[in-house]
Image (cartoon, helix red, strand yellow):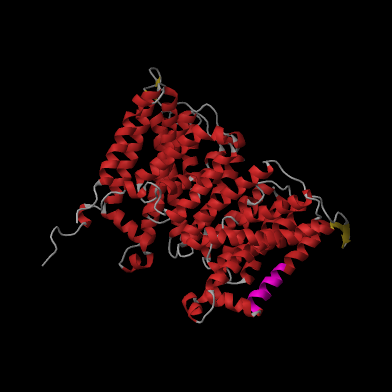
Amino acid sequence: MRPPRVGIHLTVVVWLLLAACPLLLSEWRLSQLAQITSYGIFAMSLAFLWGQTGLLCFGQAIFFGVGAYVMALITKGMVTGVGDSTVIGLLAATLLAALVALAAGLLVFRGRGLSGAYFAIVTLAAAVIAERAASHSRFIGGFNGLLDVPPLRYGGDASRVELLAPMPVYYVMLGAAGLAYGLLLWLERSPLGTTLRAVRDNEPRTAYFGFEVSVYKTFSFALSGAMAGFAGGLFATQFGFVSPALIGVPLSTEVLIWTALGGREVLLAAFLGALVVRSVESLLSEALGYYWLLGLGVLFIASVVIFPRGLLGRLLSLPPPRRMAGPAEPPR
Amino acid sequence: MAAVLIVALDAANFMLALLLVTLGLVILFGLMNVINMAHGEMFLLGAYAVVLVERQGGGFWLALVLAPLALAVIGLLIEEVVIRHVYHRFIDTILATWGLSISLKQAVIIAFGPTAQQVENPLPQTVVILGTLYPVYRLFIMAVAVLAAAGTFLLFYRTSLGLVARAVIANRPMASSLGLNTRRMDRMTFAFGAALAGLAGAVMAPLMSVDPQMGVGFLIPAFLSILVGGTGTLLGTLLGTTLIAGAGTVVASVWTQITAQIVVFALAIVVIRLFPQGITGARR
């Protein structure tokens, strides 16, 4: 049986449409979309952790927030000795978020580690801790956060150019999203990704086959944290403002809803989930008021009960990697 | 000495209030294996039931009876429409109840507005306990918590109904083939958990600002209490709430409320990491 190729076609169409957005949207909408794209990368980071490795994290915004704060601190020049360029900021945002996730992963997963609901509740509590701590640290602006985070920019001190026009900004963000997508997809389809899914589907059995399960979980957590930090760093340049709201429970659960609605097992579905929900929200939340969140909550419940793979997951799922397809002819 | 006594009384009060909130949660978690993230909102609905009854001219004591009943009905409804479909998908119960939590909170905001409501304290007197003045209503809450915990224990461990409920939990196919109606037990257990949340919300309403965010503040300490204590037994819950509430009150009396929350949550995470079965779980 030939694997269904419709997912491949749709995936290509989606990326082409995203690339064509500058032709279709007004400048204001385009800059909105550029900002939302960072949420899309954020959703992919969770989709990798949750959909591929089976770790439901209720504190994913911790890493997004760490990335955003690190980016703001560095590009505002508040950290001495590292310069204040966008690239350094993004690298540091990604690296520090990865380190936080790595440390947390080592603590949580080593030996007879936590998983399932325990992991979810512990990450939820950790998100509360992070939010409270951020609101009360004076260095990072406390409850008010950090204002005037510089936009994307390049060049040295003398000839520095700030990237402000919506179209180039959008393409930078889309490029970053493409990069994140490519990396995560490559890992997902590599033998490593297969092992991660084995951990997801049956952890004891994977352990019996000789895999060090906790190492795989920690790796996935650190990578996901790095990606979330990268997204947070990008978000800071787009939003220009970093506050404790970026690090706590509300955003952690929002990204969960985007990812679940889109489809947690398919990176692009999660990415689109974030894009669509945020776009619709910016269009409709004025008109619907309190009913928007009620509707989103009900839709979320419905999708969990009826479509556990998300609303887009089935459409956009890709055929398994060729090495998994088995021999072309059944052996006689 | 008086200061120490006040801290001890506050700790006992907080612990019993937390126990009252945690009871419903631990029944659903320990007995049905459902992580009810909407427990905070069921608690919230209990408090708003009091607001509603008082607006209609009913007194607080009537509301205290009606709130658990109302929540039992809401619990039945939720079980039938949502939870029933995800019993066999453990992690999805977290998501579904999280969606419920969002929806219920938003429904309350639409119905009552986002601002805080006031509930009159029905027992505004104070009594002198060992030389310090203490509000009577706090003592009432502590009594309700003790009674609810004792009642729950007796119901599940000393009645035939409780035996049936535990049989269904222990081995569903076996219970079913012995002719026990497992669906009905699921419904009743869920409704009972919801009713306990409603009771907790109604009892706590006069002491709290009744607003749409009031449930969240209790949800995480309640979950941490369960995980710290261990899910299998009510004794574990008792121990968990004692530790969480005791540590919280003591730290808050030395530093601030915020520091207390951060310290207690962090300590709870460490304990859960070291004893994944809970501190009572090691014996089993």
- Specify the quadrant of the image occupied by residue A17: top left
- Residue B179 image position (x, y, % from top left): 52, 80
Q: Which residues are magenta?
A: B148-157
- Residue B145 image position (x, y, % from top left): 73, 65
Task: Reply above or below: B231 against A147.
Answer: below
- Specify the quadrant of the image occupied by residue A146: top right
Which residue appears at 47% of the width and 36% of the height? A280
Which residue appears at 57% of the width and 71% of the height? B185
Q: Is A129 contained in the magenta span?
A: no
- Residue A289 image position (x, y, % from top left): 58, 36
Q: Is residue B278 visible?
A: no
Query: Is A52 situated left or right of A239 in this image?
Result: left
Task: Reply above or below: A172 against B192.
Answer: above
- Residue A220 image position (x, y, % from top left): 38, 52
Q: Is B156 contained in the magenta span?
A: yes
Q: Main secondary structure of the magenta part?
A: helix
Which residue appears at 73% of the width and 56% of the height? B202
